[in-house]
Image (cartoon, rainbow, N blue to C red):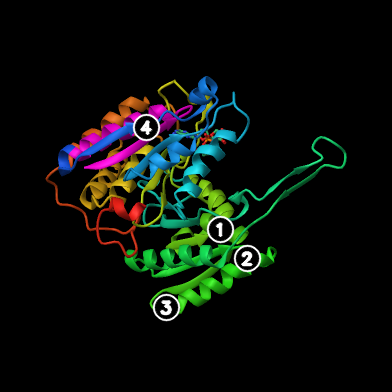
C-alpha cells in the first residue's frame, strides 16, 4: 500500500490532479498495487478561509506519507509568491528534496516547434538543484518604497549541496546509458561563486570515468537546446537556471501541458507535480491539459518502486500522443476530463502488452526498492 498526500492547490491544480488520480487508479488496477490518497487542503481557498498557509503540522504529516502529489499553487487574490513559498518551497526545503528532476521528452514530432525535429532529437533530463541558490530565502528589501530602497537576494551554493545533486546526476546518466554525457550548465564566467559547481563537477566526475563531462554556460545552453537538442543527455544545473531552462524545454516538446517533475530525496518521501503553475485564466474551465500531472504520476510510481506501472503510464501517454487523436497540447484542445479518460483508458489498454524496456528517467541512485517509511525519519 502506498500512502499518498494530495495537495490539489489552486487554479487548474484541482482539475489536473483529478485526472492524475484517474490514471493512478487505472494503473493500480492493471499493475496490482494499492494506493491510499489523502487530500490536504492547502492553497488559496484554505488561506482565505483560515489565514493558514502551510503549518508545521502539515510538514510533519507529510513525512509520514510515501509521496506527495501536488497540482499547482498560486492565486491572484493572494500576495504574489506567498503561498508558493510557504507550500512548494516549504515542502522542497522541509523534506530536503534536493533533486528536481525534469525530463524533456518529445512524444511526437507534431508537438515540436522546431523544424525537422522528432522524438529522436528531444529526449534529455534536467537535474535541477532544488534547495539552494537564490531560492534559499537569504535576502530582503530595505527602505522599501523610498528613493533609497535596497533589494538583495543571495545565491547560496554549498559544497555538500552541489556534491549530492551532481553525484545524483552522474548516477542517473550512467543508468540511462544513452550518450553517457553529463552537461554542467552554469554561468561561472560571470557569477564567480559558481566556480564551486565547476570544481565539484570535475572532482565528483573522477569517480565516473565512463561518463563524458560536458559544459555549457546557461545562455549558450538555451541556444543549443534550440539548435542541437539531440546533443543533450543529462543536464545538471543550479536551482535558478534549472527553473528557467525547463520552461524552454517544455515548449520544445509541446508546452506546459506536458512537462512533469519530481522533487526527490532518494529513498525518502518525495513530491511530484506538473512544472506548470495554477494558470488562473483557465481555472474551472475544464480546458487545461492534464498530461503533465499524469506524467508526474508516472514519475511518482517509479519513485515508489512500481517500475512496471510507471512505464505503463509513460507508454500510455506515448500511444495517446502518437495516435493522432490529440492534435495540440495547448489548453482547450480537448476537455481536461476527456484527456484524463483517454489516458486512463490507454493505461488499461496497455495491460498485457509486452512491457517496454526499463528506462532510467526518475532514477533512484543507491535505492534497492520502494521507499521504506523508517528511512524518512
Ligand atoms: N509549482 C507551482 O505550483 C507553480 C509553478 C509556476 C508558477 N506558479 C504560480 O502559478 C500562477 C500562475 O503563474 P504563471 O502564469 O506564470 O505560470 P503558469 O504555468 O500557471 O501558466 C503559464 C501559461 O502556461 C500555459 N499552461 C500552464 N499550464 C497549462 C496546462 N496544464 N495546460 C495548458 N496550458 C498550460 C498557459 O498558457 C498559461 O497561461 C502564479 O501564482 C505563479 O506563482 C506555481
Mark 4 / mark 1, whichever is N-terminal: 4
Where, by quadrant of the figure, is residue 63 drawn? Answer: top left
Q: Residues within 10 Å of mark 2 (few under 14, many from 20)?
A: many
Residue 238 tag number: 1
The residue at 39%/70% (across/down) is 180
* Label 3 to label 1: alpha-carbon separation: 21 Å
Residue 46 percent across, percent down from the top left = 48, 24
Q: In what element is the residue under mark 3?
A: loop
Residue under label 3, please give it: 207
Q: In what element is the residue under mark 2?
A: helix
Residue 4 in the magenta stretch? The answer is yes
Where, by quadrant of the figure, is residue 348 drawn? Answer: top left
Q: In what element is the residue under mark 4?
A: helix
Residue 50 percent across, percent down from the top left = 52, 22
* Label 3 to label 4: alpha-carbon separation: 40 Å
Residue 111 tag number: none
Residue under label 2, please give it: 194
Mark 2 / mark 1, whichever is N-terminal: 2
Figure check: 150 above or below 336 = below
Residue 155 in the magenta stretch? The answer is no
Amino acid at each position: 500500500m502506498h500512502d499518498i498526500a494530495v495537495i490539489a492547490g489552486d487554479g487548474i491544480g484541482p482539475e489536473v490532479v483529478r485526472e492524475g488520480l484517474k490514471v493512478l487508479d487505472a494503473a493500480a488496477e492493471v499493475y496490482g498495487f494499492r494506493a491510499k490518497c489523502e487530500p490536504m487542503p492547502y492553497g488559496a481557498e484554505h488561506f482565505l478561509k483560515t489565514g493558514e498557509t502551510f503549518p508545521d503540522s502539515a510538514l510533519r504529516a507529510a513525512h509520514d506519507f510515501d509521496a506527495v502529489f501536488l497540482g499547482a499553487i498560486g492565486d491572484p487574490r493572494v500576495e504574489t509568491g506567498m503561498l508558493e513559498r510557504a507550500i512548494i518551497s516549504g515542502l522542497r526545503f522541509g523534506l530536503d528534496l534536493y533533486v528536481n528532476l525534469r525530463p524533456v521528452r518529445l512524444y511526437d514530432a507534431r508537438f515540436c516547434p522546431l523544424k525537422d525535429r522528432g522524438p529522436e532529437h528531444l529526449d534529455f533530463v534536467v537535474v535541477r538543484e532544488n534547495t539552494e541558490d537564490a531560492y534559499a530565502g537569504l535576502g530582503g528589501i530595505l527602505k522599501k518604497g523610498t528613493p533609497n530602497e535596497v533589494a538583495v537576494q543571495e545565491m547560496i551554493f554549498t559544497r555538500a549541496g552541489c556534491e549530492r545533486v551532481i553525484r545524483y546526476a552522474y548516477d542517473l546518466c550512467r543508468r540511462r546509458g544513452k550518450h553517457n554525457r553529463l552537461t554542467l550548465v552554469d554561468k561561472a564566467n560571470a557569477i564567480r561563486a559558481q566556480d564551486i559547481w565547476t570544481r565539484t563537477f570535475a572532482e565528483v566526475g573522477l569517480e565516473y570515468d565512463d561518463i563524458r563531462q560536458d559544459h555549457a554556460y546557461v545562455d549558450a545552453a538555451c541556444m543549443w537546446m534550440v539548435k542541437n537538442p539531440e546533443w543533450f543527455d543529462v543536464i545538471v544545473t543550479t536551482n535558478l537556471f534549472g527553473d528557467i531552462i525547463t520552461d524552454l524545454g517544455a515548449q520544445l516538446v509541446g508546452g506546459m501541458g506536458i512537462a512533469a517533475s519530481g522533487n526527490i530525496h532518494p529513498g525518502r518521501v518525495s513530491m511530484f507535480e506538473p512544472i506548470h503553475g495554477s494558470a488562473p485564466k483557465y481555472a474551472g474551465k475544464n480546458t487545461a491539459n492534464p498530461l503533465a500531472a499524469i506524467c508526474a504520476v508516472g514519475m511518482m510510481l517509479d519513485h515508489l518502486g512500481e517500475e512496471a506501472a510507471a512505464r505503463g503510464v509513460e507508454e500510455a501517454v506515448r500511444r495517446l500522443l502518437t495516435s493522432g487523436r490529440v492534435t495540440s497540447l495547448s489548453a482547450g484542445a480537448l476537455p481536461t476530463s476527456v484527456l484524463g479518460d483517454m489516458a486512463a483508458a490507454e493505461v488499461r489498454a496497455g495491460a498485457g502488452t509486452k512491457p517496454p524496456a526499463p528506462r532510467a528517467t526518475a532514477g533512484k541512485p543507491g535505492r534497492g526498492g520502494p521507499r521504506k517509511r523508517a528511512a524518512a525519519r
